[in-house]
Each structure stands twice: as C-alpha cells, then as structure tokens.
Image (tube, rainbow, N blue to C red):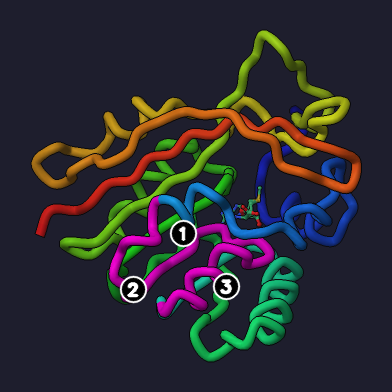
C-alpha cells in the first residue's frame, strides 16, 4: 500500500481517479445487513458514518429516521444529496462533510451505523470513536470488511486484483470478536457479532464480499 486513506485519497476515489471505481457504490442498493438489523428498531435520530453516496442514509430516512450522513468526500455527498432528492427524503437527511477522525457531533444519536468506512486512523479506534456517539438505549451497527488472505493479494494501491478489485486493503479488516471485545459489557449489550460471505452484483458480475457485522445496544 503506497498511500494513506486520507481525504485526498477519498476525494480522488469519488472523483473516479482511483482503482476500484465508485460506480457500484454510488448506485448500489442499501446494505442488506442494515435492513436486517435495523428494520425492527423504532426510528429516531441516526448517523451514517462514512455514508458515501448515501444508499443507507436514504433507506433509513425512508423508514422514518432523521438522518445525518457524514463523509469526508464532498463528491460522495453531492451524489448522496441528489439521490435523496430523487427519493423524496431530502428533508429527513442532513449531509455533513467531515473527517470523522476529528469531527464530533453536538448530540448523541439513537443509531450510529457505518458500512465499510475505513479512514486513515486504525479501524478499531475508529469504531471506538463512533460508539461514543450512541445515546443511552441507542444502537451501534458496524458493518465492516473481513479479508481472507489465503485467497487474495494486494496491488500497489492496497486494493485487490481481478474480479474483486473494489475490495479494500487488509488494514480495513477486522474480526467480529475484536469489535465486540472493545464494547464494555457493563455499558453494552451485544445482539449480533457475526462474519458472513455474500456476492454483490456489479455490471461485470458478482463481487464476493466478506462481511463483519456487529450490533450492540448501549445500556440506558
Ligand atoms: C468504502 S466507502 C463506503 C461508502 C458507503 N458507506 C457504502 O457502504 O457504500 C468508505 C467511505 O468512508 C469515507 N471516509 C473515509 N475516511 C473518512 C473519514 N475520516 N471521515 C469521514 N468519512 C470517511 C469515504 O469517503 C467513503 O465514502
């Protein structure tokens, strides 16, 4: 890997200058793990940390959540705002351009979620940081990447060759047990801590995704 996952990396990524073009992310459906884990929750306020082009934030808004979608890349947020307007939920989503390794919200949320965000800071520290923004009684939902290093190798950009070229580097990979293990049992009840495989369809076929999902509730 010859770069950091800093603002300039993500700006270039969303402007289409990097390997792993963002087209699939920009047009994709909401994450199935979000739909499964959140459907039964009572809507309130939500933060999608590293929201990209907004599919998950827009889905939450359409379910009645009042959503903040935060991302470091202005181009991603421009696409997200356009999609929210088309979906008729623009009044339920606020888009915030921010570096989440330094930005902090003014109030806690009923739901803090993140899907595949991998910032320049260490991945588990990032999850600790966003977990602190969950209100008492609220939910933390982390959807991350898991790498099977027996079957992949990195190219010069830290991304994968071949059909799964959009996959990020191993530094973004975490285990469900490692995330859950950072959540103090006195303060959190872990409802889901699992690892699974699925295919995301793209114009070129199916892309294998190895996911980590952790959902936890902050004790009131
Ligand atoms: C792999 S993309 C995932 C986007 C979206 N959540 C999805 O699932 O399609 C990672 C996202 O995290 C954002 N990101 C990376 N570092 C960030 C940071 N420090 N602060 C805010 N957003 C960040 C990127 O701009 C990018 O949109």
For mark 2, what is the residue?
Answer: 43
Q: Image point 31% across, 69% down: which residue?
A: 109
Instruction: Please tell me which of labels 1 and 3 falls first in the chain.
Output: 3
Real-space Cα separation, disc 2 to disc 1, in angstroms: 27 Å
- If the picture is divided into quarters, which one holds ligand 1? bottom right
Horizontal relation, residue 141 to residue 99: left or right: left
Label tally: 3
Which residue is pictured at 49% across the width and 47% down the height? Answer: 33
| Residue at mark 1: C-beta within 8 A of ligand 1 | yes
Q: Quadrant of residue 25?
A: bottom right
Q: Earlier in the sequence, mark 2 or mark 1?
A: 2
Question: Residue 58 has which mark?
Answer: 3
Say above or below: 93 vs 46.
below
Taking the image as shown, residue 198 lies to the left or right of residue 46, namely right
- Bounds of the magenta segment: 37-64
Residue in the foreground of this view, choosing between 207 and 18: 207
Inspect the magenta stretch and tell me whether residue 49 lies in it: yes
Q: Which mark is residue 102?
A: 1
């Amino acid at each position: 890997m010859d770069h950091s996952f800093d603002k300039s990396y993500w700006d270039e990524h969303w402007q289409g200058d990097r390997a792993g073009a963002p087209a699939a992310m920009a047009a994709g459906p909401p994450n199935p793990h979000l739909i499964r884990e959140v459907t039964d929750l009572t809507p309130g306020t939500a933060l999608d940390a590293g929201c990209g082009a907004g599919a998950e934030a827009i889905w939450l808004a359409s379910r009645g959540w009042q959503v903040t979608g935060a991302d470091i890349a202005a181009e991603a947020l421009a696409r997200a705002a356009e999609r929210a307007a088309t979906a008729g939920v623009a009044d339920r989503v606020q888009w915030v351009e921010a570096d989440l390794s330094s930005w902090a919200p003014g109030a806690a949320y009923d739901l803090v979620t993140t899907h595949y965000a991998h910032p320049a800071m260490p991945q588990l520290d990032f999850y600790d940081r966003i977990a602190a923004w969950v209100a008492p009684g609220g939910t933390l939902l982390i959807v991350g990447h898991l790498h099977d290093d027996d079957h992949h190798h990195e190219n010069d950009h830290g991304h994968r060759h071949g059909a799964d070229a959009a996959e990020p580097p191993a530094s973004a990979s975490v285990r469900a047990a490692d995330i859950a293990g950072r959540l103090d049992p006195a303060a959190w009840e872990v409802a889901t801590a699992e690892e699974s495989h699925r295919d995301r369809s793209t114009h070129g076929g199916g892309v294998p995704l190895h996911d980590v999902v952790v959902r936890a509730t902050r004790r009131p």
